[in-house]
């Protein structure tokens, strides 16, 4: 005989809250019930170890799944410790009460091969997200009598004597009928059940078995027939929990490709187990190619999170700093504090500690690659170096010390990528600044007029070809107390004293002409001056302090709802040693008014060299044509 019993904890409202609000995805129920079955098997396994009970192995303590489409039932059955009547009443009649927590505390030290997954006692009730009736048949190890706990959550539950042909627990879910918004039939589909086991419970350490109907070719015939075979759905032992010495490179490669949907082998593998105040295992991969959606909003960074081999979430952003967002992989820890649904992390120092250690591990791997396998690192940097630069820029330079030695830029002297450290080590003693120039490509930068003289003086120049480069260096300000200097901005101060004196003299003698050119150009320029920046070129534009030309282009390419444009201050610089300057002086002496056309032509030429459009191409062309005609008279 049985009698209806009320739930002992809170009220029906609490149960409704748990099954409707705590879990984000209904499919989580299978993970929770399998985890509970694993807990019960662990308890039995521990008891066998402690009491020296013979004949126990994990392989024999399987967890069986059974689908009955006609009855609309899904059954989860284990060979664990089982429960008697009092324990069914205590653990299933009291919401948020679980024996796992107490059992975990009671484990003897040294028995580290027994893991208890469930710690909240609410996982069982996730079954009511998909079932309108749940039956739990259980027989405790050592007892002769089995009991059944049954509830439809309407007004409580019943417990009565029943039968079970083995110790352990069998949970029968009577699935709900489909609705317009929910399809419960999917939990009767054998391939969907297999998918959910692979996704959430692949590394449960007991075999999860299910009879599956498959189509096979008949012997001595081309015809096919449906046959039923028992399959083990989970792999049981995670790759990351195996001894490294037993894992081949191809094992890591195949795991990565299947787990993270990549067709290429990873460039680097980092497999680490850390024990101490915070214990975890991490298996991290650096992809060998940039994912197709990496620079789109569809790309989700973060590491997969497991707790004792049970899948918790797919993209845990808290465990991976954004400047290493390209890293794929997973973390498995028994020390993580999860919220009640085990779908999210609770913010605490443990998460932060693991994240800090993972960051250090990735930094070490990249540093080792840079120092020991230069070609591999250059390939990595081509793929993901931009992320390191954004890391410095987005942190307003706070990550400078962590990332600066991992940066690489093209060297004008070396004709190859070099680090900032290598640049500084090769600097002449009299060089005070790190010179750089920006542009679309290395080839175009190399043709800039401002580059020629700096190279001629024996100084190396870093060529910056990505939009983020200048912003990154601006946030860094310097490297080892050597400030960064744009060769196309401000005074370079690389002339000898004799050159400076000659430049000053020439400027003083031609002040009126320079003022006339500046007047002619109006607000197009902030200044017109003679320069020691040029060698063979007649003119160039330099930017005043602040925003550079490349930064102007990058900022103006960004969406701006207000339509405001950024503009760098333009300085027209004229080479006093070029024949053009002599021609300008002659024109100004003969006909000062003509200097206006020359000023416009020179300015437009300088704009084109810098990659800017001229304001009036037709006027520019007309003035050039007129000068050509005059030259033939």
Image (tube, grey):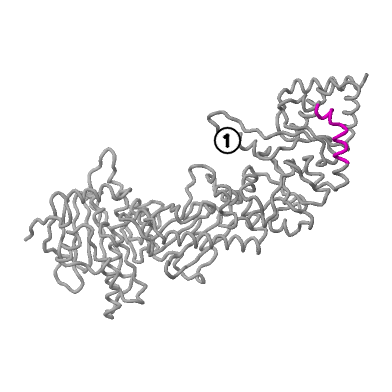
Look at the image and say whether residue 434 sits in the magenta stretch: no
Mark count: 1
Q: Is residue 71 visible?
A: no
Q: Quadrant of residue 504?
A: top right
Point 29% across, 65% down: residue: 39
Q: Is residue 511 magenta?
A: yes
Q: Position of residue 176 (x, y in %)?
A: 22, 46
Give the residue at x 25% y 50%. Answer: 19
Query: What element does badge 1 sit on?
Result: loop
Which residue is at the front of the view, 461 or 189? 461
Residue hosting label 1:
558
**Residue numbers of the magenta segment:** 502-515
Residue at (78, 41) in percent of width and height: 450
Q: Position of residue 413 (x, y in %)?
A: 78, 52
In the image shown, does 269 or 611 lie closer to the viewer?
A: 611
Q: In the rendered view, tell whether residue 141 sits above or below residue 442.
A: below
Mark 1 crowd level (few <14, some 14–19, many ≥20, 10 Å Cα)? few
Q: Is residue 391 visible?
A: yes
Side (left or right) of 619 relative to 99 = right
611 lies above or below 37: above
* Predominant SS of the magenta segment: helix
Q: Residue 204 location in percent, x, y?
A: 36, 63
Q: Is the N terminus in the top left, top right, bottom left or bottom right quadrant?
A: bottom left
């Amino acid at each position: 005989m049985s009698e209806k019993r009320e739930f002992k904890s809170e009220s029906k409202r609490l149960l409704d809250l748990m099954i409707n609000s705590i879990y984000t995805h209904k499919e989580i129920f299978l993970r929770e019930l399998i985890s509970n079955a694993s807990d019960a098997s662990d308890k039995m396994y521990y008891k066998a170890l402690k009491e020296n009970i013979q004949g126990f192995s994990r392989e024999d303590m399987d967890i069986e799944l059974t689908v009955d489409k006609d009855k609309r039932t899904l059954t989860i059955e284990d060979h664990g410790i089982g429960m008697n009547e009092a324990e069914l009443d205590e653990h299933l009649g009291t919401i948020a009460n679980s024996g796992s927590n107490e059992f975990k505390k009671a484990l003897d030290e040294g028995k580290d091969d027994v893991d208890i997954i469930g710690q909240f006692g609410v996982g069982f009730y996730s079954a009511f997200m998909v079932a309108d009736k749940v039956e739990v048949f259980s027989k405790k190890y050592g007892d002769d009598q089995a009991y059944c706990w049954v509830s439809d959550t309407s007004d409580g539950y019943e417990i009565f004597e029943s039968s079970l042909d083995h110790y352990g627990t069998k949970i029968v879910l009577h699935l709900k009928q489909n609705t317009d918004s929910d399809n419960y039939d999917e939990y009767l589909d054998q391939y969907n059940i297999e998918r959910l086991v692979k996704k959430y419970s692949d590394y449960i350490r007991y075999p999860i078995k299910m009879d599956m109907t498959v189509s096979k070719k008949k012997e001595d015939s081309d015809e096919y027939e449906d046959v039923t075979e028992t399959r083990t759905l989970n792999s049981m032992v995670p790759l990351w929990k195996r001894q490294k010495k037993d894992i081949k490179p191809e094992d890591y490669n195949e795991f990565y490709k299947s787990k993270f949907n990549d067709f290429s082998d990873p460039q680097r593998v980092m497999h680490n187990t850390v024990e101490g105040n915070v214990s975890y295992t991490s298996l991290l991969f650096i992809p060998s190619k940039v994912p197709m959606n990496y620079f789109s909003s569809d790309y989700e960074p973060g590491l997969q999170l497991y707790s004792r081999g049970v899948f918790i979430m797919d993209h845990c952003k808290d465990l991976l700093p954004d400047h290493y967002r390209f890293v794929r992989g997973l973390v498995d820890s028994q020390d993580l504090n999860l919220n009640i649904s085990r779908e999210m992390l609770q913010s605490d120092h443990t998460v932060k500690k693991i994240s800090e250690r993972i960051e250090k591990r990735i930094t070490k791997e990249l540093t080792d690659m840079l120092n020991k396998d230069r070609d591999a690192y250059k390939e990595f940097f081509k793929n993901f170096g931009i992320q390191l630069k954004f890391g410095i820029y987005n942190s307003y330079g706070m990550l400078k010390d962590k990332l600066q030695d991992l940066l690489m830029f093209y060297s004008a002297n070396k004709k190859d990528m070099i680090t900032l450290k290598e640049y500084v080590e090769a600097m002449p003693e009299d060089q005070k600044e790190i010179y750089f120039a920006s542009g679309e490509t290395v080839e175009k930068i190399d043709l800039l007029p401002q580059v020629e003289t700096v190279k001629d003086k024996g100084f190396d120049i870093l060529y910056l070809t990505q939009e983020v480069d200048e912003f990154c260096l601006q946030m860094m300000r310097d490297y080892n107390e050597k400030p960064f200097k744009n060769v196309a901005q401000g005074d370079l101060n690389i002339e000898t004293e004799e050159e400076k004196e000659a430049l000053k003299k020439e400027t003083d003698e031609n002040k009126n002409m320079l003022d006339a050119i500046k007047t002619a150009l109006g607000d197009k320029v902030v200044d017109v001056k003679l320069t020691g920046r040029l060698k063979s070129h007649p003119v160039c534009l330099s930017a005043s302090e602040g925003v550079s030309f490349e930064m102007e282009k990058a900022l103006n390419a960004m969406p701006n709802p207000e339509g405001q444009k950024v503009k760098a201050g333009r300085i027209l610089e004229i080479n006093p040693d070029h024949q053009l300057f002599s021609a300008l002086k002659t024109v100004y002496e003969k006909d000062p008014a003509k200097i206006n056309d020359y000023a416009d032509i020179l300015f437009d030429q300088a704009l084109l060299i810098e990659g800017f459009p001229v304001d009036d191409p037709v006027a520019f062309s007309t003035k050039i044509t007129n000068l050509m005609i005059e030259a033939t008279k």
